[in-house]
Amino acid sequence: MKRSEFLRLSMAGVTLVALPRPGAAQADAAGDLRAGLKLSPTSMDPHFRLSGEQNLLRAIHARLVGMTPDGKPEPGIAQSWRPVNDGLAWEFTIRRDATFSDGSPITAEDVAYSIARVPTIEGSAGAYHIFVRAITRTEVKDAHTILLHTASPYPFMAEDMTEVAIIAKALGPNLRTADFNSQAVKIFSGPYTLTDFRFGEFVAMQRNLHWFGARPSFETANFKVIASDSSRMAALLAGDVQAVDEVAVPDIARLRRDAALNVTQIAGMRVMYISMDMDRDVSPQIRDANGQPMTRNPLKDVRVRQALSFAINRAAIVDRVMEGAATVASNLLPDGTPGTSSALGVTPFDVERARGLLTAAGYPNGFQLTLHATNDRYPNDEKVAQAIAQYWTRIGVKTDVATLPNAAFFPAAARQTFSVFAAQYGADNVSYAYRALVHTYDRERGLGTANRTRHSSPRADALVAEALREMDETKRNGLLAQASEIAIGEEAIIHMIYHPAYVYAARKPVSVTPYYNGAFLPQAVTRG
């Protein structure tokens, strides 16, 4: 199914009857939004971490380039942009009515300051460095015009600038992440301003009276962190909150049968994937058929990796475990996204072929491994891992499942602690998916930042590098498609399983506009 078709079919509205919370009607009439949020932002610094939960900060820190719900660049602080100097620079024109929350104008100097700050941030496991790597120099032409220079033609500048928050130069050269977290920062560029927050508990915002864009529906927005899916749904039904994100898979059908809720859904620019340690000669959680540590890593053999892929019934996982709230994946990004390959079909479920490949690789009796996954990050993440383990065990690769909370899982994965892990990857920027997940890890160049098993394909790397310089869209998409064919098909570096949907629910007349990156934004919540 094409992504555009899935997007059309996945939008839905529903309802559910529940008693209102005392005082709720009065609060609603005053223009106050109360929302339940699954994940807490890890920092109030908009340049600190690139992760899904940080998307909430888009409400208080605007980007140079805006982003539509389906991920396309649109005017933001910049009203227009264009490549100049034979593609060696991009010129951005800033809106003349763009102002910060204190009423001061947003100028090209603020943009240059924001871009320069990004590489200086320390301590982040998911930094924004990659979005400014291509910029060799910023040139402020006047208060409303800035040129971003690059060493070679770079076609993804507008997409990159949908990620970099613009903050005020007046905040000073020594601005630290701690200053955001201590609420010392009082100047914001988004449609809301931050009024209070407590990590893991809540984020409170107020409408920015100096916001230059469309006026948000709600004067205040209070996001309460409710990590438990059942508790989040209970809060919605009781009227304690008006809207929630990340509706749990088992609740979707039930909510759609009622009439007091609006349920909205979008095909996410995200993939559930499996990554394997194919670099080390000895891998920590791999054992032979008798349970003894192996001195040879079987995952280095492409036939073994392909066998494990053929052993997974992706359609069954989507239908039975995800209950239809996903689509089977054949590419890194959903079908129809620029850069996807039509030559990559869904890997067929073929047990006999999987067993044959294991035998050909020298493992007729299989071996044992541990599959690591999160247990609190994605819808049904632990159940999905258990299903995959069962499929692998059936072909002779006895698989144990070890799950960890999100906060512990990703630091451990970054340290290459796991032999095999299942996770999800989301990309606001098409090129970033290839730079971060497919490319060989290269800290200095900001490549392979999500490549936690340190897989490497020189052929795929070369194609990605060429695509990052190709200004012709058709040629560029062809290069990325070839990189996908190598990483997913020929070398089986990454196993794509499914593309999950993002599902939101709200009490009528409130409705949430879903974003393809899972963002839960107060400015995207409306009445009627």
Image: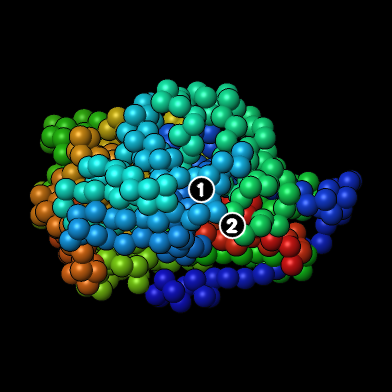
Q: Secondary structure at mark 1?
A: loop
Residue bearing the label numbered 2: 213
Tag 2 and tag 1, C-beta contact below 8 Å: yes
| On screen, residue 59 above or below 67 | above
Viewer-nearest residue: 194 or 446: 194
* Quarter that holds the N terminus: bottom left
Q: Position of residue 328 (x, y in %)?
A: 39, 66
Q: Residue at x 59, y 27 (%)?
A: 183
Could you tell me if residue 268 is visible in this image?
no
Q: CA distance from mark 2 to mark 1?
A: 10 Å
Amino acid, disc 2: Gly
Q: Which mark is residue 41?
A: none
Picture quadrant where residue 252 is located: bottom right
Front label number (2 vs 1)? 2
Identify the residue shown where x is 17% and y is 61%.
86
The amino acid type, in three-letter code, at marker 1 is: Ala
Identify which residue, 143 or 359, lies in the foreground: 143
Q: Which residue is mark 1?
A: 62
- The answer to which of 216 and 378 lies nearer the viewer is 216
Residue 481 lies left or right of residue 201; in this view the side is left
Vertical side of 218 occupied by 343: above or below: below
Look at 52% across and 59% down and name the residue there: 515
Identify the residue at image location x=67%, y=35%: 195
Instruction: Assign a secondary structure to mark 2.
Output: loop
Q: Residues within 10 Å of mark 2 (few under 14, many from 20)?
A: few
Asked whether, in this view, residue 6 is left or right of residue 437, the answer is right
